[in-house]
Each structure stands twice: as C-alpha cells, then as structure tokens.
Image (cartoon, helix red, strand yellow):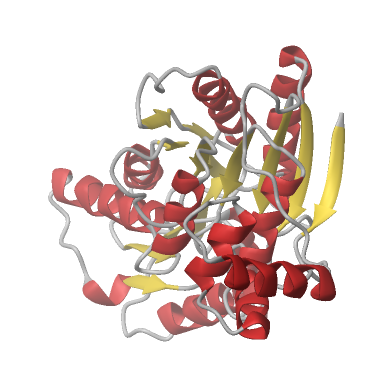
Amino acid sequence: MVRTASASVAAGPTLAVVAREAGVSVPTASKVVNGREDVAPETRRRVTEALDRLGYVRRPRFDAAKAPRLVDLVVHSLESSWSGAVLHGVEEAAHDAGLEVVVSAALTRSRVGRPERGWLDKLVARGSSGVLFNLAELSESQYAWLEQHRIPFVMIDPVQEPPEGVASVGAANWQGGLTATEHLLSLGHERVAVIAGPRRTMCSSARVAGYRSALAAAGIRNRAEYVRHAGFDESLAHRRMLELLDLPEPPTAVFVCSDRMALGVYQALAERGLRVPDDLSVVGFDDLPEARWASPGLTTVRQPLSEMAATALRSLLRMMDGHHPESTRTELSTRLVERASTAPPRR
C-alpha cells in the first residue's frame, strides 16, 4: 500500500520558538521535552508553560521495536516518469515484504531536492522505520539528524557522493557512457560530442568519463568544445545542441546524458532542418518511456531504475532488522537499447 504525504505542510512551533518564549536556550528546552532531570524547577515550569501555550507537539523518539512496518520514499518530484519508475520498483518490493510506503515530494523554495527540516520532524512523528531518498541532496546537519534519531536510510542515485558509511544504490554510469560512445564509434563516427548534466553530479561526471575513455581507446582526440553541460533540462540541452551545430566543425553524433535532454536535442535539430539519424546520430541515457515515444525511436542506455529502487529497499530492510548493508555502494549494470536514432555518418 502506498500513501502520499506533502513535505510542505505547515509544522507547529519549533523548539527554538518555545525556547525564545520561555527565555531559555534551545538545549535547555530540549532537556525539558526529553524529560531530563538536570533542569531547575523554575526553568522547567517556564518551558512547560510555553510548550502548552504554543501547542508544541512532543515528538516521540524513534523506537524500531515499536515502529509499524512503514517506510518513507522521498523524491524531488512526483511528475516525472523517472520518479514513476522508482515508485514502481519500491512498491513491488514493499508489497513482497509486507510494508507500507509513504511517498513525499520534498521540494523546497531554497533548494530542489533537499528535504526541509519540518519534514524530518514529521518522519519521526509518524513512526517510519526507514527512508529511501531518491535524487535528494542532504546537508551535513540532516545526515546528523537521521543518525541522531537512529533512522536507517538508503540513497537511490545520490546527486553527490554520500558520507562514508551511508548506503546507496546507483547504476554503472561510467560503463554506460563508455557503451554509448563505443556504439557511435562502431558506426564510423569520429566527431562525437556529449551533452552532460551538471558538472558536480556523480552520475554526469561518470558518464562523461566513460565517453572520454571510449574516445581515448579508439585513438580519437578529446575535443573540449565537444563537451557541453546542461542541467538535465530539455531547454538547456536544446541550447547546447545549437552551440555544437554552430561550431566550425560540428559533430556527426552526440551522446546525451538523459532521455529528457535528448528531446531538446531533437527539437534543436528540427529547427535547423536536420534529420535524425541521417544528419546526426543521437544516443540518450535512462530508457524512459519518452525514448520509445520519440520519433525516431531513441537509442539509449537503459538505467534499471525500478531494479535500483527495489535493491535499495531490500538493503533498507536489512538495516531495519539491525544488520549492516552488504555494501555501502551498489551499482547495477546498464545496457544499450538500440532503436532508430543512430546510423553511420554521411560520407
């Protein structure tokens, strides 16, 4: 069973507000909330009255022995086919394990993909046994908060490398980049460009590294002008493709590091009166439904999103049962799915 929850629901007063109302420090207020004895009676009275006056909800500390079989899946958006594939994998694995799943879209105004502190407090309040984070970027304080409350969690395809000891599941991105580029080289392309995601993301860096390794192994020079970065965004990929076409010697093929970005590349080529693959071959990455719907069908590297999500949940189950994960970093293999968007270059 899957339930949804919003990360933006207004929370009650924070402990900092209570402390200010009572004229004490936050640690002192925390001692009162947690029933510590090392607080003066008068101070305890002021804090208690402030708690009651402000309607502060005392959140129970996480207790795995008493917790229901409930886990949270935190995604950055519920609108993408990417999140749909992840949810499908989690739902199937959760059903087999007899778990319920709460799905939260943890968008904030300040930073996409970073769950707000209020949501973390709600996590403890509803007694979830563990958390799966998909495309979420956590701050050091949020990692510390999860550790403090002893809540097991696993990252699915983390944006940046997690701290040491944090379990994560991803895809073999380097191998995927290598495979995509080798496919284009095998067709006879020598002028192969790449449109990657943000520079600082782990998956984007690994895919570009695989691309460069394939070129080097084939004895083809890496051209700096052929490496462009976008934000996993159609409009930016569209712009980068136009930039590549305006080069004195434009590429004959392009490896695009997501299917969604590849749609922007298709649009740019259409605007210039160019055809895929007659004038330029295109390879994507992910194998989302959009890859099959595109015209022509997009050759792409399949990233096993549902399997990644299911693997992450199984790892989380081990942690919920008190065991260490078999590996802190698990990578599932990728494979090339050939469709109609690639062909030998024109002679």
Quarter of the figure that contains the N terminus: top right
Say left or right for 290 vs 116. right
Say left or right for 293 vs 249. right
Vertical side of 299 occupied by 94: above or below: above
Q: Provide residue 251's location: percent of width, then percent of height.
A: 37, 68
Q: Provide residue 162's location: percent of width, then percent of height.
A: 36, 49
Q: Residue at x 28, y 77 (%)?
A: 225
Q: Provide residue 37's location: percent of width, then percent of height.
A: 52, 52
Q: Residue at x 65, y 32 (%)?
A: 129
Quarter of the figure that contains the C terminus: bottom left
Please name whichever residue, 1 or 203, is drawn nearer the observer in this view of the structure. Answer: 1
Q: What is the quadrant of residue 160 in the picture?
A: bottom left
Q: Residue at x 61, y 27 (%)?
A: 64
Q: Provide residue 193's location: percent of width, then percent of height.
A: 36, 64
Q: Residue at x 59, y 85 (%)?
A: 23
**Residue 343 in sight in this render:** no
Please name whichever residue, 102 or 297, is drawn nearer the observer in this view of the structure. Answer: 102
Q: Across the whole image, how many numbered discs are drawn on residues?
A: 0
Please name whichever residue, 123 or 329, is drawn nearer the observer in this view of the structure. Answer: 123
**Residue 165 in sight in this render:** yes
Q: What is the quadrant of residue 91 in the picture?
A: top right
Question: Outermost residue, front direction?
Answer: 41
Vertical side of 171 occupied by 332: above or below: above
Vertical side of 1 occupied by 160: above or below: below
Please name whichever residue, 115 or 250, is drawn nearer the observer in this view of the structure. Answer: 115
Say left or right for 8 vs 142. right
Vertical side of 274 occupied by 282: above or below: above
